[in-house]
Amino acid sequence: MIVQFQKQNTEYPDLTPSQYDVVIGIEADDFRILNDRGRPFLYEASLFGIIDPREPDDWIIEIGEDKERYAYPPPLNPVGFFEDFFDEEKEAVVIFWQVVNQRLAAASEAV
């Protein structure tokens, strides 16, 4: 899935308007993308326009109790994965960048 940040917003100085971003995952309907600093943060989906709605076939998709959506590639889906990543646990960091680099390469072919 490829999205585009819609307009400059002082609340989000780490996002560039009109830039294409690859959605790494969806968590409680928010998009996890790499911001301009290369960090995988969650942002409200309403901030973005959808450029390419296709999601990778291997994503694990779950629906929460309040009908919120969760979708991640299998290696990034374990509970606590992003806590481990932000705690800089080596295995999580290596897995994250392997998956993200594959997704970015695939997305660059799609655009």
Image (tube, rainbow, N blue to C red):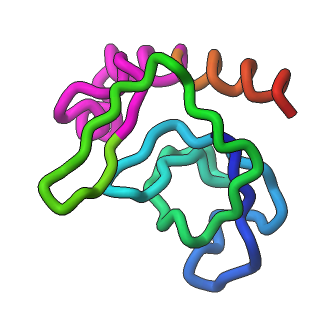
Q: Position of residue 26 (x, y in %)?
A: 42, 46
**Compared with residue 99, is residue 43 higher up or lower down, i.e. above or below?**
below
Is 5 in front, or is 10?
5
- Tell me what residue is drawn at x 52 percent, y 37 percent: 24
Is 70 in front, or is 87?
70
Q: In terms of image quadrants, where is residue 68?
A: bottom left
**Compared with residue 24, is residue 103 higher up or lower down, i.e. above or below?**
above
Q: Quadrant of the N terminus?
A: top right
In the image: residue 19, left or right of residue 86? right
Q: Position of residue 28 (x, y in %)?
A: 31, 56
Is 111 in front, or is 96?
111
| Magenta stretch encompasses residue 70 | no
- Tell me what residue is drawn at x 56 percent, y 24 percent: 56
**Compared with residue 98, is residue 21 higher up or lower down, i.e. above or below?**
below
Is 43 in front, or is 85?
43
Where does the magenta region start and end? 71-98
